[in-house]
């Protein structure tokens, strides 16, 4: 798992519309990577709905939110439409779990990512990280608190 202060490992994955997304191309604004096990599952839906329901907090802070799982682009597109999510989703399907492995959240036993969230500053440096087992939901409010701290620190530099 990358440590706080490390440059985030780069990757390219297709989004829900099969468009390639390269993490390093998003520099210049904060990025939040939200690794989750599987679309349409109850805990994952609850976590992503919490982000959706607080979406203006992310927009006001200029954050790019990317959900990442091993689901197919088709499943991610259907889930995004079904739940009216505002963020993009990336498919870590092939090679399976490549990005999750880079971030240390891959579960070989389960065949999918555990719950990992990484907030990167505008320069692509990891400023916040949390890694929970697949059975333990994350606290969305902690993301907004972390973003405020990251932005306050960037403003004082």
Image (cartoon, grey):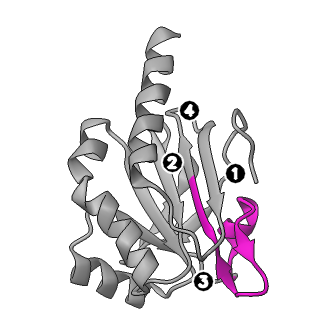
Magenta region includes residue 84: no
Q: 122 or 115, which is in the foreground?
A: 115
Alpha-carbon span between mark 4 and mark 3: 27 Å
Image height of 32 relative to 154, above or below: below
Alpha-carbon span between mark 3 and mark 1: 18 Å
- Of labels 1 and 4, earlier in sequence is 1
Badge 2 vs badge 1, beta-carbon distance below 8 Å: no
Residue with the mark numbered 3: 93
Camera sees residue 23:
yes
Q: Residue at x 25, y 53 (%)?
A: 55
- Of labels 2 and 4, earlier in sequence is 2
What secondary structure is found at the residue carrying circle 1?
loop
Q: Residue at x 69, y 37 (%)?
A: 4
Residue with the mark numbered 4: 123
Badge 4 vs badge 3, beta-carbon distance below 8 Å: no
Residue with the mark numbered 2: 25
Q: Residue at x 26, y 69 (%)?
A: 85
Image height of 63 relative to 22, above or below: above
Residue 9: which disc? 1
Which quadrant would residue 19 be assigned to in this image?
bottom left
- Of labels 2 and 1, earlier in sequence is 1
């Amino acid at each position: 798992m990358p440590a706080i202060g490390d440059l985030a490992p780069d990757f390219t994955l297709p989004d829900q519309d099969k468009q390639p997304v390269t993490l390093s191309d998003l520099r210049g604004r904060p990025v939040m990577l939200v690794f989750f096990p599987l679309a349409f599952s109850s805990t994952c839906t609850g976590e992503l709905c919490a982000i959706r329901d607080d979406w203006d907090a992310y927009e006001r802070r200029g954050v790019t939110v990317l959900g990442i799982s091993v689901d197919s682009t088709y499943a991610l597109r259907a889930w995004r439409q079904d739940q009216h999510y505002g963020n993009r989703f990336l498919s870590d399907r092939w090679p399976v779990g490549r990005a999750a492995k880079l971030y240390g959240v891959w579960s070989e036993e389960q065949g999918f990512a555990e719950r990992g969230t990484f907030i990167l500053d505008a320069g692509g440096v990891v400023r916040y990280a949390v890694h929970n087992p697949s059975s333990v939901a994350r606290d969305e409010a902690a993301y907004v608190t972390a973003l405020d701290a990251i932005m306050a620190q960037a403003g004082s530099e």
